[in-house]
Image (cartoon, rainbow, N blue to C red):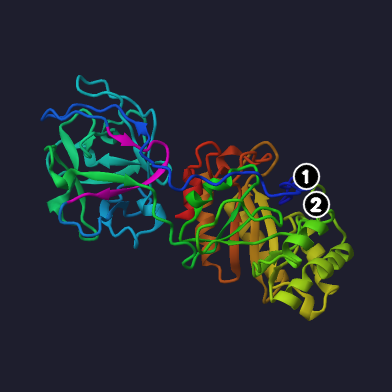
Amino acid sequence: MHKSPPRCSWSLCASYPQPYPLSPPNQVQSLMKFVLTVVPLALGVSAALQAPVNSPINIQTLAANSNIAPCLQAAGNYDGAAVTVVNCATSTYAQRTWVVVNGGAEENTSNAGPATQIRIYGNKCLDVKDGIDQDGTKLQIWTCYDGSINQLWQVNGAGDISWSGHSKCMDLTDGSTSDGTLIQIWTCYSGNTNQLWNAISPRPASVCSGGKVGLAWAPDLSSSFIPNAATDKTCHIYDWSSWPPSTTLPQGLKFVPMFWGPGHEADWTSNVIQGATNYGIAMGMQEVNQAGGANMTPAQGAQSWKDMLVPLRTNKNYQLVSPSVTSASSGIPWLQSFMSLLTDSEKPDFMAVHWYGKALLDMQNYLTTFHNAFPGKTVWVTEFACEGFDGTGCTDDISYFANGADDWLSSQSWIGAYFPFGFASDLHGVGEGNRLMNASSGLVTPVGWAYLS
């Protein structure tokens, strides 16, 4: 019932001789390069502000009494969450990272040109509470709906952000830059510093402050997008190879090399065993019980493990993640036989498993069974998604599955890390609903944010 697909895992039906050829982004390139049409305000202000479109940004207040300009943030990832300002350095990456959406729905009023949504968490929009057009109405976030007049905004030349079709601007209540100050709408006034905002490149995420989420990053997805997915919950990243991503990783996000299996000994020896970088953790072979994976007998697996992984512990003090098995019926017996062929000093620190299936409860039950089969061992779930590979997809609603999986996996003391699938362009048969990042824009999807936020 829990059988993984007979698919070829990433990069690995053929050799992977060099790092995925991607160029890192130009870190100094200005975000201010897309121009939005601007609506004349009630007081006659009209200009064109160069503003970032379809790119993650932080939005800072330019209030005159601000010594360190705080950032606009949402209090949480739920409908009705308050919009406030907070110290950019203390809020989480997810809470303060917005996207001005290109080509947003247009409101056909006499004074409104093209309008845009300002999004967060993938599918939540900056929203005027109850659509009340009066000074002091507070802002919130709400699930985005195309054409909702409560969610349409103009980014204007004077540095303000106006509610499309109205003479109201996004306003810092009482001009206070204290953490938690609510954001409201107020009649637009030229030069009012409570209504002036600046878009900047997102401050780096505070990566890995106690989370267990890992990034299983497919080599067909641009590595330049990795910072978009790095949050306080993400600690590890792997790419099914011994080659680290070509983009410099955010501080705190650790690359974990994988010895995929037969045919990759030379790269592994050069990059990891003899390599100058000590990554600290290394992963064993990929889906050893699966056709299309490493597909080895336990005896073959034990020998490869002793040759390729154990020297890292002996010589470099690495922690080791076992070969991964699928949730097919052969998975647990394969690992049990493999473990019986190792001495105590050769055994892995963490046990790796992949799970694909149709319901959250099925995943919880299987992983509990897997854990009980290896008492005392910490489990790494190095691939998982709600996909049954039988043409019917996921029994659970994908959003329900993702939120429930994140809550449950993070709360189990015996789970050390979990890597949802997929951060990939080609999902290899996994349902589109499991996509965690838009492969063209690099924006995290709502399902991705369920794990990352």
**In the rendering, at what x and y percent does residue 262 appear?**
84, 56
Q: Label 2 belongs to which residue?
A: 290
The structure residue drawn at horizontal position 70% and vertical position 70%, both measured from the top left corner, is 320
* Residue sitting nearer the eye, 424 or 202: 202
Q: Quadrant of residue 394?
A: top right
Q: Label 1 belongs to which residue?
A: 6
* Residue sitting nearer the eye, 407 or 238: 238
Query: Over which residues does the magenta segment extend?
Result: 49-63
Q: Quadrant of residue 214?
A: bottom right
Q: Are marks 1 and 2 in contact (CB under 8 Å)?
A: yes
The structure residue drawn at horizontal position 43% and vertical position 47%, both measured from the top left corner, is 28
* Amino acid type, label 1: Pro
Looking at the picture, does residue 37 appear above or below residue 295? above
* Amino acid type, label 2: Gln
Residue 241 seen in render: yes
Residue 337 seen in render: no
